[in-house]
Amino acid sequence: MKYSPFALGATLYMPATRDDIVAAATGRKIPSLKSMVICLEDAVADNDVEFALNNLQLITKELAQKKSMSSKPLVFIRPRNTEMAKYIVANYDLSGVNGFVFPKFTLDSLEDWAQITSDTHLIWMPTLETRDVFDASEMQKLATALSIHPMKDRIIALRIGGNDLMSVIGVRRSRTATIYQGPLSYVIKMLTCTFGALGFSLTSPVFELIEKPELLQEEIEQDLIHGLVGKTAIHPTQIEYIQNAWMVDHAEYEDTLRIINSTKAVYQHAGAMCEPATHRQWAKNILERSKLFGINHTDMESLSI
């Protein structure tokens, strides 16, 4: 089944050690949640791995019984490595799970992940978070390899692993600035151009400052400008901010309809040139977002006051 990358919305990360994962994964705990990741990697301490794996077995068994639910979020598992992924595929009932998040994904690990998931229904969300992500030529090789890979349609989006990338260069997120005001600004721009040009979508790094919603909103505005399709959330309070941002402004929606339906090669509207041939993919993305997140009519309400 093909999923829209915009369906990810705010992707909530939850350590596999938690006891409320099924409640989140079935929509009971957070009804607005669109996607989540059950994490066995960085979010689980080494001495808790066995407990996390045992807990995951119970979780997947229960999710398999509820797989027919239509309102549940997309559920991904993030194993620690390919060896753990093989074990999970071989021993767990994954019929209630949608996909895997691949940690530390590289060109060298591509075929390992392909082999592990080849006989499953699992979709892919590879994470770009290793040293070679800073090398534009290496990312071009990876993007090209993915674009011709027989399993490329499994990729719903690629994740930009912000914290791991900052760790590579020995820095930590500023408490007063967005990620676009630091060294990862270059990386995000390069990745969106490299992978986006070949038809792949990317999601934005986690925003770890839970008590800075204004800064989160400022960063999300930049996420949208850079064409990212969603954002990792580490706390439920971040979900509303992220998903509200992906709502479509009424004026933007009206622009979209004009572009989709226009028979003109070029025209002017609201002081801007519109060229449907070059703006059509943008318009299709806006329509997709409007279906998933709705239309924000507050701009029209303000005009009528």
Image: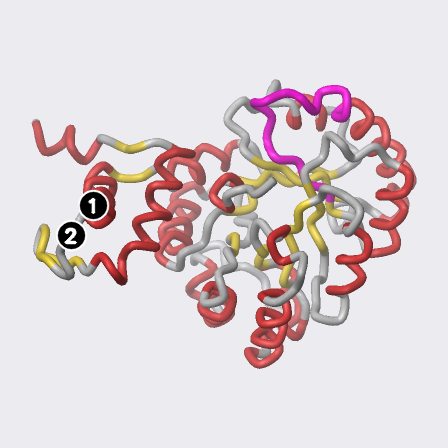
Label drawn at residue 155: none
Looking at this view, name the residue that lies furthest to the bottom. Answer: 137
Query: Which quadrant of the figure contains the C terminus?
Result: top left
Quadrant assignment, res 129: bottom right
Give the x, y percent position of residue 295. 30, 33
Q: Is 66 placed above or below 83 here?
A: above
- The residue positioned farthest toward the front in the image shown: 263
Gap between marks 2 and 1 measured at Cα = 7 Å
Left or right: 134 in relation to 176: right
For label 1, the crowd category at 10 Å Cα-Cα, with few meaning under 14, some 14 to 19 and many 20 or more, is: few
59 vs 32, left or right, is right
Residue 120 point in image, percent of width and height = 77, 44
Q: Is residue 104 visible?
A: yes
Observer-nearest of 97 and 264: 264
| Quarter location, residue 37 | top right
* Residue type for callout 1: Asn
Magenta-tinted stretch: 63-77
Q: Where is residue 125 drawn, in percent x and y?
A: 64, 51
Quarter residue 301 falls in: top left
Q: Mark yes or no: residue 166 visible.
A: no
> Mark 1 falls on what kind of element?
helix
What amino acid is labelled 2 in the image? Thr
| Residue visible at 58% across and 22% down in the picture | 70
Residue 115 sits above or below residue 294 on the image: below
- Residue 109 position in % (x across, y down): 76, 66
Residue picked out by circle 2: 263
> Quick check: 269 above or below 90?
below
Whether residue 136 appears in magenta in the rendering, the answer is no
The residue identified by callout 1 is 261
Are the two marked residues, 2 and 1, in contact with CB atoms closer than 8 angstroms?
Answer: yes
Q: Quadrant of the N terminus?
A: top right
State the SS at label 2.
loop
